[in-house]
Image (cartoon, rainbow, N blue to C red):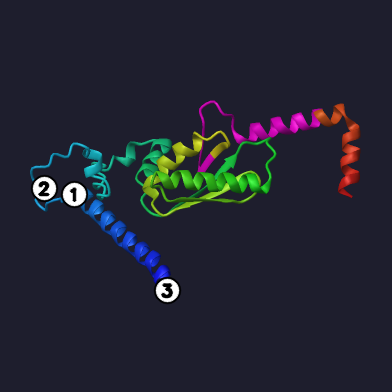
Amino acid sequence: MARTAWPCALVILAGVLLCAAVETAVAAKRVSIPDDLRDVVDDEEDDDWRHWGAAAPPRDDGPPPDLSGMDPAALQAELLRRHAGPSFGFVKLRLGVRRSQEEVMGIATRWTNVLRTGSVAAKFVAMDFGTLMFTMDRGQDILEVKEFILSQPEAYEFKIGNQAFRRPGDPPLDEVVEMLQKQKSTMLSQDPGSQQYKSKVEL
């Protein structure tokens, strides 16, 4: 009995000494930080860090312009710039590109997430294989959404209300549709067997 008690006592003694050594080491590593930090120089913060999270200053658009002397295009641009309420519109994707339902939904999700990182609350929803609809609560961000959409390679046209915006040099939608129909008819006239096969498959 005494022989088995001796190793147990030795193990307990070693454990107590080990705990005491660890506690001493932890106590030695502790650094006391005083409450008075006036003499500490913090050069890691910049102006952007100090103003992070603060409310944006109110937008000063100046006095309203004289609308009586404006042409319709300038008037629509001014109304779009000063829009403040909820808004929605449509984005026409590039024509002539086959997309699956997953690809179109992926574009809508990606655009929503990218704009969210820029604190623009716009949500895109796939309407069909070539059209997305977007909704947003703050209409004052509409110009930022327009710039973003027209910078995307998948986008062809941005439409809000009766206004349609395209990249400079892009032809109107009617011309693009007509050009695609001509290409399709040319391909069918060159290979009439493909049309017969297609009609049999559709039946």
Asked whether the residues under the numbered discs 1 and 2 touch, taking CB atoms below 8 Å apart as contact, a structural biologist would say: no
The span shown in magenta is 158-186
Q: Is residue 132 above or below residue 178?
A: below
Residue 63 in sight in this render = no
Q: Residue furthest bottom?
A: 1
Q: Position of residue 57 (x, y in %)?
A: 23, 46
Query: What amino acid does circle 1 point to?
Result: Val
The residue closer to the viewer here, 21 or 128, is 21
Give the residue at mark 3.
1
The Cα atoms of the two marked residues, 1 and 2, are separated by 15 Å
Q: Residue furthest front?
A: 2
Give the residue at mark 2.
37
Left/right of residue 101 with respect to residue 20 in the rendered view: right
Tell me which label, 1 or 3, sits earlier in the chain. Answer: 3
Q: Position of residue 186 (x, y in %)?
A: 80, 28
Left/right of residue 143 with respect to residue 123 in the rendered view: left
The residue closer to the viewer here, 40 or 148, is 40
Q: Position of residue 27 (x, y in %)?
A: 21, 54
Query: What amino acid does circle 3 point to?
Result: Met
Which element carries disc 2, helix, strand or loop? loop
The Cα atoms of the two marked residues, 1 and 3, are separated by 48 Å
Crowd around label 3: few <14 · some 14–19 · many ≥20 (10 Å)? few
Tell me which label, 1 or 2, sits earlier in the chain. Answer: 1
Q: Position of residue 92 (x, y in %)?
A: 58, 41
Crowd around label 2: few <14 · some 14–19 · many ≥20 (10 Å)? few
Which element carries disc 1, helix, strand or loop? loop
The Cα atoms of the two marked residues, 2 and 3, are separated by 62 Å
Q: Is residue 162 magenta?
A: yes
Mark number for residue 31?
Answer: 1
| Circle 2 or circle 3, nearest the eye | 3
